[in-house]
Each structure stands twice: as structure tokens, then as C-alpha cells.
Image (cartoon, grey):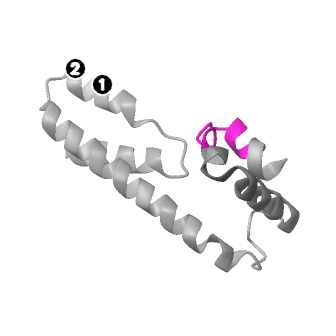
């Protein structure tokens, strides 16, 4: 159950939710749990979370005309222009909790 908790914590931390799996990882290491299995659980959760993010990004534009879509058309256009201009480098600071969103989308 402890390893599943770390897996789930890593999954949440790697997706859109503001979570930190490192705190749980350090706490479990200090309590003497097997480092190898902690590494496996954390890595699996983070990898699955990254796959979820990729899928959400891949399918994002399918929902842009829905009323509940959280990004306005002009903001989405600006974000696409920034990505076209800077490519992958535009994602360098996207992981920052507040500033990353403000840099590319909300502005």
C-alpha cells in the first residue's frame, strides 16, 4: 500500500495537479523502505503522469470550441505562435507553478 501511495503521488505530481511526490519519497526512505521499490513506484507514477499529460495535450484542440474550454481563442493562438517561434525551448519554464502558465497562455 505504501508503494501504491508513492506511485499515486508521483502520478499526481506529474500531471496538472500541484503536488510534490519528493516529500513522500524522502519520508519513506527515512522509514527504511526498500529504495529500489520506492524508485520503481515513483518512476512508474511519474511516467504514467507524463503520458497522461501528453495525451491531454494531443487531444486538447478537439475541445477548443466547447463552452467549458478554459483557454480563450486569442490566448490559445498566442501560445501556439510562441511554440511555433521557440519550439521545445518554450516549454523550458512551463513547469513553474504560476509563472509557467502566465508566460505562455494567460498573458
Q: Are marks 1 and 2 in contact (CB under 8 Å)?
A: yes
Rendered position, 1 above or below 28 = below
Residue 46's spot in the image, x, y percent? 37, 48
Picture quadrant where residue 95 is located: top right
Residue 30: which disc?
Answer: 2
Residue 68's spot in the image, x, y percent? 74, 71
Rendered position, 46 above or below 58 = above
Mark 2, secondary structure of its residue: helix
Magenta residues (range): 92-102
Q: Magenta stretch: residue 95 in it?
A: yes
Picture quadrant where residue 58 is located: bottom right
Crowding at mark 2 (Cα within 10 Å: few <14, some 14-19, many 20+)? few
Write the residue at 58% across / 74% down: 59
Residue wearing tag 1: 26
Residue 82's spot in the image, x, y percent? 76, 53
Q: Magenta stretch: residue 39 in it?
A: no
Determine the CA span between mark 1 and mark 2: 6 Å
Amino acid at each position: 500500500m505504501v508503494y501504491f501511495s508513492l506511485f499515486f503521488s508521483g502520478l499526481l505530481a506529474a500531471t496538472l495537479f500541484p503536488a510534490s511526490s519528493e516529500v513522500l519519497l524522502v519520508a519513506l526512505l527515512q522509514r527504511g523502505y526498500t529504495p529500489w521499490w520506492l524508485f520503481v513506484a515513483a518512476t512508474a507514477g511519474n511516467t504514467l503522469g507524463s503520458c497522461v499529460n501528453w495525451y491531454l495535450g494531443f487531444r486538447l484542440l478537439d475541445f477548443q470550441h466547447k463552452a467549458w474550454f478554459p483557454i480563450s481563442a486569442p490566448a490559445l493562438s498566442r501560445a501556439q505562435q510562441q511554440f511555433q517561434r521557440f519550439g521545445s525551448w518554450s516549454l523550458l519554464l512551463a513547469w513553474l507553478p504560476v509563472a509557467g502558465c502566465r508566460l505562455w497562455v494567460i498573458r
